[in-house]
Amino acid sequence: MIRPVIGTVAARVAITAANLLVVAMAGQTLGAEGLGAISLLVLGITLVLILAHVVGGGGLVYLVPRLGVRSVLLPSYSWALFATGIGYVVMQFIPLAPNGTLVHLVALAFLQALNSIHLNILVGQERIGLQNSILVVQSVVQVIGFGALLMWNGPALMDYIEATYIAHGLTVLVSGWFALRTAVHGSFIPTSANFRALVEQGGFGQLANLSQLLNYRAAYYLIELFRGTAALGVYSVAMQLAEGSWLVPKSIGGVLYSKVSNMEEQRRQVQSTLILFKVSVVFGLLCATALVLLPDDLFATIFGNEVRGLRPLLLLIGPGLVAMSGSQVLSHFLSGTGRIRHNLIGSALGLLVTAGAGWPLIQAYGTMGAALTATLAYSTSMTYQVIVFLRITRAPASSLMPHINDVRKTRMLWRSIRSGRAERGSYL
């Protein structure tokens, strides 16, 4: 498990750096208003993808080892087309597509839905290194394309959209070639039982993702409503920086999901989850602390003079981000063991906190209220997942706390990495 984690962390570092470079270029050339417009566009795409991923999303990681590639292809592709069609209709009534970009929003969502299908097939086959390489290339292409278009056309929102077309279009072709090469056995015509399994596994997962997305991004709409697009632009930068503290936890969670989905022995599942939970929380804490200590003038230099006041926002978001660092691991354990409904419940509880606290706090305190709401919601979701994990595994609550044995396990982990024997068995 160690090498995939290291490779995924390295890939996410590169992807995060590329994403922040895109944000910096947008902030310097398009200003806070442009950053806000990009945030709304990305939010709209993500909402369409929530529906598309009911069949073609993360549930494929769990089902590909069980059903095979051929059985999932036709329903996944068909559902992606259906979902983006529904998205086009619905998005005409939700004002998220800025400056008449609705067609582009839906088209980009369809490209990303196809890409997700291919990449989730690769993860389900434990071809994690290949998935990471494809995603890194995608991010690099988008940075280069965006920079070239800014210089060629002059600063405009369409530069970001066209660069995204180029990056995701290329990725769809490359990921599809690698994923479909393995579709050599079985029937392309899915059975009703297989389709039902796809919908059940993906449906619960996407309801959970929708609730979690609203936890993450409902504040965007309220900030834009009460404080305007420029304030949203500043807040979106704070969130992207703060969510960078999930770099290692997301990497660990993604690899854990793939491994747990293919692992039968519960003892190893629990052991892996416990140590990786602690590692994730520590990394989240270190990253959040580092962000809070950076001077606000540095952020303004990187992202543009209009992007100021990030440190107070990061300070309020910090505790919630540490909580979500642990949640990344627990949610992937629950998904990988077929208990995805608990992720839905945890996300729904966080959403209730967002709905109850977000409106009055954001109306009264603006972006500061949004940051506080995020921390309350994230902490609520993780608390529920911790309770469920302890009940399911019968592990004592003390097992989630730092222990002297963790030092020994860390040393064993490091020796495994150096010796190159990390894939030969459990290091726990």
Image (cartoon, grey):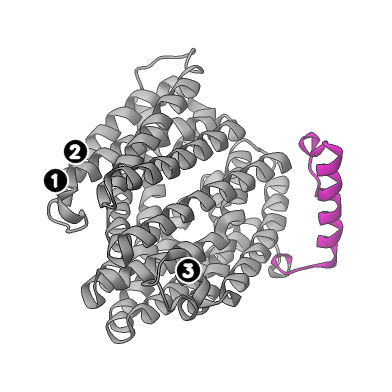
| Secondary structure character of the magenta stretch overall | helix
Which of the two residues, 375 or 148, is positioned nearer the viewer here? 148
Residue 415 part of the magenta segment: yes
Q: Is residue 250 above or below residue 60?
A: below
Name the image quarter holding residue 126: top right
Kindly report the distance in space between the C-alpha atoms of the residues bearing marks 2 and 1.
7 Å
Which mark, residue 89?
1
Q: Residues within 10 Å of mark 2 (few under 14, many from 20)?
A: some
Magenta stretch bounds = 399-428
Q: Residues within 10 Å of mark 3 (few under 14, many from 20)?
A: some
The secondary element bearing badge 1 is classed as: helix
Which of the two residues, 271 or 423, is positioned nearer the viewer here? 423
Is 47 left, or right, of 393 in this rendering? left
Which mark, residue 301?
3
**What kind of residue is marked 3?**
Thr
Question: Can you identify the residue that label 2 sits on?
Answer: 85
**What kind of residue is marked 1?**
Val
Give coordinates of residue 180: x percent, y percent: 45, 20
Could you tell me which residue is drawn at 37 percent across and 62 percent down? 27
Residue 169 part of the magenta segment: no
From where the camera sits, is residue 48 visible?
no
